[in-house]
Image (spheres, rainbow, N blue to C red):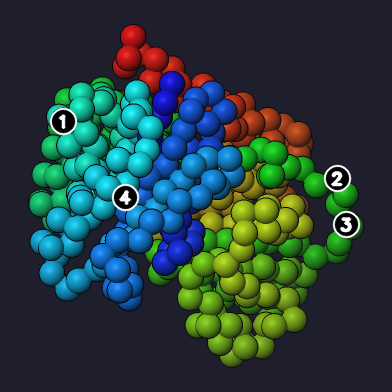
Amino acid sequence: MKILFISSWFPNKLEPTNGNFVQRHAEAVALLNDVEILHVIGDYHQEKEFVFDDKILNGIRTLVVYYKNSNNPVLNILKRMKAYKLGFSKMKRPDIVHANVLHNNMLFAVYLKKKYKIPFVVTEHWTALQEQNLSKTPQRIKRIAKYIAGNASYVLPVSHNLKESLKLLKFKTPMKVISNVVDTEVFTIPSKTENSESTKLVHISSLIPRKKPQEIIKTIVKLHENGYNVRLEIGGDGETEPLIRLVEQLNAESYINVFGALRYDEVAEKMKNSDYFILFSENETQGCVILESYACGKPVISTTVGGTTELIINGLGVGVEKNNTEELYSVLEKICRQQYSFKSKEEIRKFAVDGYSRESIAKQFTEIYQEIIS
């Protein structure tokens, strides 16, 4: 089948890692289908009205259309829709559109359905539509989300937690959970494991406040001060300077390393070289990094919030209460003392491969596509 991926978030020259999980979904689907990707984003700095960046990325034709952004939000919406139409005119006519994130960008999927009778599905990732955030999410956004969903053939949340939250918006569209994907050919069990007396932990994220990176650093420092031989690699594609300053203030440079944005394969190397992955988020729709760590055979310590509650399973990981730094310390202390029993590296990896590999996710999406056009 010919599948066109469009998304409210997608990697581009302005935001290189934004929505990279959508790109990985598209790459999975391309194992069994003919996939193209169209993305549109505004750029305040460009002189031309529209710039077309047409490339083959990881074997998939990917067209990003940049439009000249302005300070007028209504004008920007009109430009965005025109950019989508211009981009669509350069693509193959798809059998199905696979939209991502129930944001107003995906009104273009509704337009394609009404004008060309092309059905669409929507994969949902957005924390704004989780139950704990719905009261803070503007009514306008929720109305648009419900309208887009009402025109879709399926809404496909990435976790059961998110599915239950979407039910509160009273969608009548069928819903099925299809997870984020892990490239289990990149995230693998390391061939060699160096013997080390220290406990090596890694945290990789966008480093935004709800990920609580500073609390992770402070907890590791406390462990070190109490005599535990522990090391932390912490970083990602967010603000690293405040973390570097904090590490310097705490005189922790010898055992805590802060790093910046990484390529996908470099993320895998960080995980392979660690003993455990640590996540202390206030909220997650799923937690791709947990699955990536499992694919490397590495256990995870994580807050049980949102979709992570479905992934922190006995023998694979240890759950921690949100914002509970005392419990985080207690769990990590037991980790250092090796007081938890985890499954073998091979068993941990099998969990990721069986349910979340590219092949598994490709099959699940393709079954949905076939049901729609049959």
Give the total number of marks visible in the rendering: 4
Q: Amino acid at mark 3?
A: Glu
Q: Amino acid at mark 4?
A: Ser
Q: Which residue is mark 4?
A: 8
- Element type at marker 2? loop
First reached walking from the N terminus: tag 1 or tag 4: 4
Q: Amino acid at mark 2?
A: Ser
First reached walking from the N terminus: tag 3 or tag 4: 4
Is 67 rendered above or below residue 87?
below
First reached walking from the N terminus: tag 1 or tag 3: 1
In this picture, residue 369 sits left or right of residue 268 = left
- Element type at marker 3? loop
Question: CB of mark 3 within 8 Å of CB of mark 4?
Answer: no
- Spatial CA distance of label 1 from label 3 is 59 Å
Q: Is residue 324 visible?
A: no
Residue 249 in the image: state x and y as whole percent: 59, 90
Q: Which residue is mark 2?
A: 191
Q: Which residue is mark 3?
A: 194
Which quarter of the rendered picture does the C terminus lie within?
top left
Is 255 rendered above or below residue 344?
below
Q: Amino acid at mark 1?
A: Lys
Q: Is residue 254 visible?
A: yes
- Spatial CA distance of label 3 from label 4 is 42 Å
